[in-house]
Amino acid sequence: MADNVEYTSLENDLSLFSKSSKITQLEFESDGDVRIDGNIKGIVKTKGKVIVGPDGVFEGEMISNKLDVSGKATGSFKVADMTSLFDSAVFTGDLVTGRITIDPEVTFNATCRMFQKEERKKLLESL
């Protein structure tokens, strides 16, 4: 069913970790959007959106404004605005987010807490 997913257009510059990428100790910070189609372990911080594509695997810590997951994501996630988990997603870890949508076929093994208004404001200022 994930083959029918249409991603919204990215609003900022794009950093792409392609399907052939394998990075084990990433510390990455960006003002733009990030797409992960490879295997990435580490820390990602961006003011934009992070997309973990259907073949993407992310493990680590992530702080972003928006997050779309169709692949596998494991770790600690702080998402100021919207987290979207699509049917093929496998999501494990801790999530704090402003809003969330979860498709019916998602594997979701995580704790989830919604940001309070002031927490969200502080996170947005820190990005």
Image: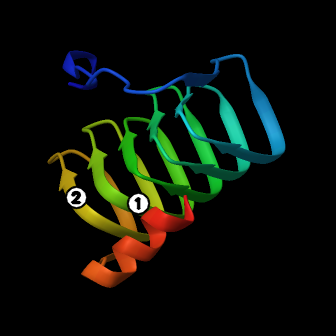
Element marked by disc 1: strand
Q: Nearer the viewer, residue 65 or 68?
A: 65
Q: Which residue, as the protein is rendered here, is positioned at the far right?
A: 25
Q: Indicate which disc residue 100 carries.
A: 2
Nearer mark to the viewer, of 1 and 2: 1
| Residue 46 relative to residue 84: left or right | right
- Is residue 93 shown to the viewer in this render? no
Disc 2 residue type (three-letter): Ile
Q: Position of residue 111 (x, y in %)?
A: 38, 77
| Residue occupying image coordinates x 46% and y 27% | 12
| Residue occupying image coordinates x 64% and y 18% | 18
The quarter of the image holding the C terminus is bottom right
In space, the residues marked 1 and 2 are separated at their CA atoms by 9 Å
Mark 1 near mark 2, Cβ–Cβ under 8 Å?
A: no
Q: Position of residue 93 (x, y in %)?
A: 50, 68
Q: Position of residue 11 (x, y in %)?
A: 37, 26
Element marked by disc 2: strand
| Residue 118 relative to residue 103: left or right | right
